[in-house]
Image (cartoon, grey):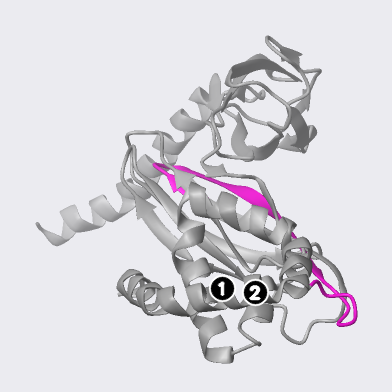
Amino acid sequence: MTKKSFLLFIMISPAACLVLYAIGAAQRPLYPIISVPRFVDAGSLSSQVSFQIANAGGGTLSWNIGDIVYKQAGGWISSINPRNGNTQTASTVTVSISREGLSLGTYTATMPIASNGGTADILISMAVAPPFVYPDSIDFGDTLSAAVFTIKNYTSSPLLWSARCSDTDNQSVAWLSVDPGQGELAGGDNQTVLIRIDRSGLAAGMYKAFIEIILSLNNEQGSERIQIGMTVSDSNNTPSCPVAYVLNNNGEDLQALRKFRDNVLVRCPGGRTAGKLFYANGQRITNALRDNVALRRTVAVMLRAILPYIKKITAGCAG
């Protein structure tokens, strides 16, 4: 390229860029035009979903969301933030979903949007599916120290989960724990998770907490909660434990039996049922053993006879 040609190129290039910019600007409308997605799906897990109201034209788009029209049961859109605004580019709107009290199924609603750049309707959809976690509440009373809950993946996709224990003020609690604290389930699988209660050092009274299970499925994220109730009795009113009474509070033997309860019995429905019946009638059983010396001695002999087998079973489960 000659020097003359190079100088000519330098002079023409800016002018060409200005011409192209002017053509592009002339093709862009000077007035606002609303642009929104036609369909927004919150799935079966998400409690919030977001979308954008965009200005595909020029100027400033002023928009406002009208009254929601529900096709099935109403009220499951609990909040919309914001409901109106102004933008030269795009505004993000967040919709909060509440599934409480709704039957299983798919729900849809129409969200009308009016603006100075036209009107639009968005179809909002969400599903109410069977719970992944059950039961949704467990009461340990003043005697139980272990229980289980189940996570069921009824879909065909992998399900990731993690657990967090907190009190009613959303603060972590030391007396409540879960084992394991996280996991992954293939489609159709289920998992039993152990809950432990430790009353050591706690003042007498009633305690409440929550186990929040964070769930992740495909591109959806959500959570389910288990409400936990527990009581710490005053030392003067604590019901006597029949086993402790029979074994004269022998620490090693009691610890072995409690490990068997927490690691073996609570993991099967029959064991959980038996445990509930035992603790519900604990004081009555203790009274009967106290009044009948022969019965107390017989029960003590039987317990000590089966303790070696109980320890082996517990060790095998722990391994």
What kind of element bears circle 1?
helix
> Vertically, is 24 above or below 272?
above
Residue 125 highlighted magenta (yes or no): no
Task: Check disc 1: other Cα within 10 Å, few if <14, some if 14-19, many if 20+.
Answer: few
Q: Which residue is mark 1?
A: 298
User: Is residue 306 something one can see in this rendering?
Assistant: yes
Residue 38 in picture, x, y percent from top left: 54, 19
Q: Residue at x 54, y 61 (%)?
A: 163
Identity, as a three-letter code, of the amino acid under mark 2: Ala
Span highlighted in magenta in the image: 215-239
What kind of element bears circle 2?
helix
Compute the Cα span from label 2 to label 1. 6 Å
Residues at circles 2 and 1 in contact by the CB criterion of under 8 Å: yes
Q: Camera-side residue: 82 or 311?
A: 311
Residue 227 highlighted magenta (yes or no): yes
Residue 255 in picture, x, y percent from top left: 54, 83
Residue 294, numbered label: 2
Q: Camera-side residue: 261 or 6?
A: 261
User: Is residue 209 something one can see in this rendering?
Assistant: no
Q: Residue at x 50, y 74 (%)?
A: 303
Which quarter of the image is occupied by the C terminus? Answer: bottom left
Task: Check disc 2: other Cα within 10 Å, few if <14, some if 14-19, many if 20+.
Answer: few
Q: Camera-side residue: 11 or 108?
A: 108
Q: Quadrant of residue 82?
A: top right
Q: Is residue 25 left or right of residue 168?
A: left
Q: Residue at x 80, y 71 (%)?
A: 239
